Amino acid sequence: MVSALYPGSFDPVTHGHLDLVERALPLFDHLTVAVGVNTQKQPTFSTEERVEMLREVLPVSDKLEVVTFSGLVVDFCRARGIGAILRGLRTVSDFEAEYQMALTNRHLAPQIESVFVMPSAQYSYVSSSLIREIVRNGGDVSSFLPAPVEQRLRERLSRD
């Protein structure tokens, strides 16, 4: 059985994230979407809220689960017997950062492979930080976010 981990902050989860999950599901026997706990960042949504939103908008599948993790991705993979790390590549700058991370992960855990998937073209330039900025300035992000996520984001950012 080949299982993969799709780690990220998902702050907020976008159609680009969902696109990557849909592309990955046929490739793996099991996919774990893992919301990273990073105490050095100030996320818009709590870890629990991000997990809740992911569970709300991801497809229902026995092959898919949503969890949280902290620490090194490779340690989490080893502990769960996960053999691949799924990452999305939108831009050349993504490639440079992901390449460095993949080589570091390979050094730390040679048995765990990094798998890169390109998103659909309409999501190739979208980032969560860009979406948050558009919402702060009253712009339309309906084509980038699932409706329940957009509503939560607008409510959250209107309080700031």
Image (tube, rainbow, N blue to C red):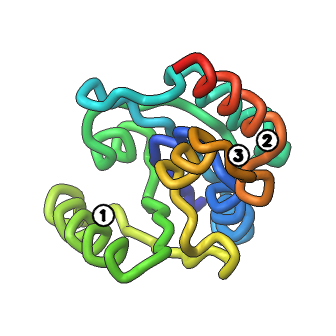
Q: Nearer the viewer, mark 3 or mark 2?
A: 2
Name the kind of residue labelled 2 in the image. Answer: Val
Q: CA distance from mark 3 to mark 1?
A: 22 Å
Residue depicted at x 46% and y 46%:
8
Residue 119 position, x and y percent, is 62, 74
Residue 5: tell me if it is visible: no
Q: Residue at x 51, y 54 (%)?
A: 130
- Badge 3 density bin: few <14, some 14–19, many ≥20, Cα 10 Å: some
**Helix, strand or loop for disc 2:** helix
Q: Which mark is residue 111?
A: 1
Coordinates of residue 123 in the picture (x, y in percent): 64, 70
Check disc 2: other Cα within 10 Å, few if <14, some if 14-19, many if 20+: some
What amino acid is labelled 3 in the image? Leu
Q: Quadrant of the N terminus?
A: bottom right
Residue 95 coordinates in the image, percent (x, y): 34, 77
> Which residue is the site of mark 3?
64
Instruction: Describe the element under mark 3 as helix, strand or loop.
Output: strand
